[in-house]
Amino acid sequence: MTPHRPGRPAGTPLRPGEHVVVIGFGPVAARFVDDVTDLAAEGTLRLTVVGGEPEPAYNRVLVGEHAMGRAERSSMALADPGALARAGVDVLLGTEVTRIDRSRRLLHLTDLRTGAVRELGYDRLVLATGARPNLPVLRGLNPDPGAYEHLPAGVTALRDLRDARTVRPVVARRGRVVVLGGGVLGLEAALAASEAGCPVTVVHHAPWVLTRSLDAPGGALLGRALADAGVEVVSGTPAREVLLGRERTFRGLVLEDGRTVPGELLLLSIGVTPRTELAAGAGLRTARGIVVDHELEADVEQRVFAVGDCAEVLCRDPSCQVCPGREGVGPSGLVGPGWRQAEWLAARFRAELEAVAEGGTAVLAPLTTGPAGAVRLKARQVELACAGEVGGLPWEPRPDGGTVVQWADGSAGTYAKLVLRPDRTIAGYAVLGLPRSAAGIGLLHDRGEPVPADPSVLLRPDGPDAAAQQETRMTPGSTVCHCAGVTLGRITEAVGQGASTVEEVSCATRAATGCGGCADAVRRLVEEHAAAAV
């Protein structure tokens, strides 16, 4: 078990034969289940996973790609129910957990297909309930989150496979698409729809898109890049009403200034809210998400845990030396941090079982948060990467004594901004239209390494003299897949052992199973190895 902290009740470690139940079967739950399936297969523990959707776990990050016809359903699979069943894992699909009875350690379940109700006992509970899409307060829509399944025809948040099935016919006939929200997911969907031949308009209430990740100059240049890619952006004007035609079918979006943006499909992309209702009903503490400490415990008995988008890390122990403060780390919306949590929790359970079997005490390094995950706009027409805080101007003093470095080339549509700490490490960055430079800057940010004395050299990998310059070189320890935390060395090893396609590398290492942004890099490594062999 993990080291005991002062002021915290000691819990009972997981023991052989106990029943672990996972609520939710999204990407994070699938990672946890995958990491403990061997324990279920050998009978060390019982494992049940309960999923509300009729489909087994799939890569939600690729739902938009699937909706646009650019990703097949088979390439999105993250779990094989048949293989899990053969390993002794009970998989309950199309099943909703309606209540958690913590006093009796019972779950109340409802089969969504038949309506049958049953109870299921547990010894340990892992909440991986994820998040639900936010619904806007607009005339013509019911903003109640519970009304999502009853949205008018042609209105969707593009969150799951059912939503993708709504979008695909419109994209296939190149219908007009309206995207409400200028965040990264909304822009990716807009660019993909535009590339598929659809007229696309993005409506964003703030002065520029990606408001949380970019400053005004970066937002303006990104807006121009979107226009060049065929995406119209209407910013600075909130929406007011959804126009519906016959049979409550979407026909247009009315803005506060009176303009109407016509369309056949409205994609809602205004963020998500963690699903905390089950936890709150069970008496667990909730805030932005289900409150857990850095050991992912949601209760003092150490029987209920939460991972992924539903979890908010907020340590309640004032004596804790791991957590940097009392501010909670809310759900990031990125799959990578959720996978880190799932892997750590699986390792904790494994260590506890081994310690009990050997009559000792397991010690596991605490789960800590690394640098803020980068936001990457995954689109073929626009290259953007940003992370951390990018506010401030080069000529303004920063409170921490750091500096701001900024470049812009209006003719090329490129932009780069670095916010540096006093020790010259990168606190935040935004890079547009410079993919090689973005990769090098991202490596420096992730490693916590200082920038060169002349930061402008970071732009040279994308410059006209790139061939004459030495590009930032990756080492075996460099991270290629940030979602799964897979290094260059691990991928090279898998390729050397015979993995000859991106899919085979993914099976061996889990690289390119998240957002897919590293797939091209993995493909290049495979091709380089094949060329060297020839």
Image: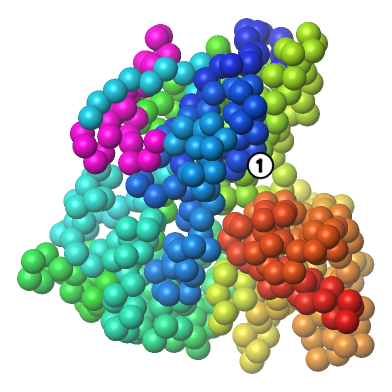
Residue pointed to by mark 1? 340
Q: Quadrant of the C terminus?
A: bottom right
Q: Extreme left residue here?
A: 246
Question: Label 1 amino acid?
Answer: Arg
- Report whether 530 appears left or right of 39: right
Q: Looking at the image, can residue 291 be seen?
A: no
Q: How many marks?
A: 1
What are the residue bounds of the magenta stretch?
Answer: 92-115
- Classify residue 368 by image quadrant: top right
Q: Residue at x 44, y 68 (%)?
A: 66
| Residue 348 picture location, percent across and down | 69, 26
- Classify residue 267 by image quadrant: bottom left
Which one is in front, 71 or 217? Answer: 71
| Element assignment for label 1 | helix
Which one is in front, 174 or 276? Answer: 174
Which one is in front, 451 or 148? Answer: 148
Which one is in front, 304 or 94? Answer: 94
Q: Quadrant of the N terminus?
A: top right
| Residue 83 picture location, percent across and down | 54, 43
- The relative height of residue 97 versus residue 2 in the rendered view (above or below) is below
- The relative height of residue 281 versus residue 137 in the rendered view (above or below) is above
Q: Which class describes the residues within 10 Å of circle 1: few (<14), some (14-19), or many (20+)?
A: many
Q: Residue at x 30, y 52 (%)?
A: 135
- The relative height of residue 412 versus residue 420 in the rendered view (above or below) is below
| Residue 58 picture location, percent across and down | 48, 53
| Residue 411 picture location, percent across and down | 64, 92
Q: Residue at x 89, y 78 (%)?
A: 532
Q: Is residue 113 found inside the magenta-colored segment of the image?
A: yes
Q: Is residue 106 found inside the magenta-colored segment of the image?
A: yes
